[in-house]
Image (cartoon, rainbow, N blue to C red):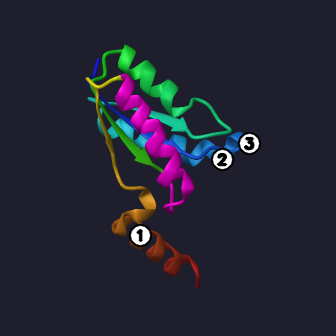
Amino acid sequence: MSHSAIILFAHGARDPAWALPFRAIQAAVAASDQTKKVELAFLELMQPALPDVAERLIQEGVQSITVVPLFMAQGGHLKKDLPVLLDALRDQHPEVNVTLTPAIGDVPELTQAIAQWVIQVAV
């Protein structure tokens, strides 16, 4: 059992197919690093929710969780909702190291990769 985990955090949608690209990212990350558990959690409309995933991981012995927001922009969910969720998790489990990465839309390499793809396909 790994003591470290990654939680990919996405918004959620009513259409189950919406989650397919996020599940593909989860599978690719998990395949690249088998020393960490890699889970997918949602803010709303889909399950599992972030607190549920984190609680299960902690019960399994995970001591370090990295949350990676799969959001393109800093909106209310990342500015308000996610900090509340993470503060509650840290308050309930101060022994667990919980870190937060930038949202994918805030990573220059990723936005540049998207721009390059658009340039290639928009011929």
Closest to the observer, 30 or 96: 96
The three-letter amino acid code for the residue at tag 2 is: Trp
Which residue is under mark 3? 14
Task: Answer with mark 3 or mark 1, whichever residue precedes in sequence.
Answer: 3
Q: x and y percent of residue 93 in the render?
A: 34, 23
Crowd class of label 3 (few under 14; some 14 to 19; many from 20; radius 10 Å): few
Mark 1: amino acid: Ala
Q: In the figure, 116 relative to 94: above or below?
A: below
Asked whether the viewer can see residue 25, the reply is no
Residue 58, quarter of the rendered image: top left
Q: Main secondary structure of the magenta part?
A: helix
| Secondary structure under the numbered disc 3 in the rendered image | loop
What's under tag 3, amino acid-wise? Arg
Q: Which mark is residue 18?
A: 2
Q: Residue at x 52, y 36 (%)?
A: 41
The disc label shown at residue 113, or none: 1
Q: Which secondary structure lies at badge 2?
A: helix
- The verdict on residue 75 being magenta is yes
Q: Which of the image's four quarters has the N terminus?
A: top left
x, y (%) of residue 114? 47, 69
Instruction: Please give the name of the residue rendered at 43% of the width and 58% of the height, measured from the top-left corner.
Output: 104
Determine contact: label 3, label 2, CB under 8 Å: yes
Q: Which of these two is toward me, 87 or 71?
A: 87
Magenta range is 71-92
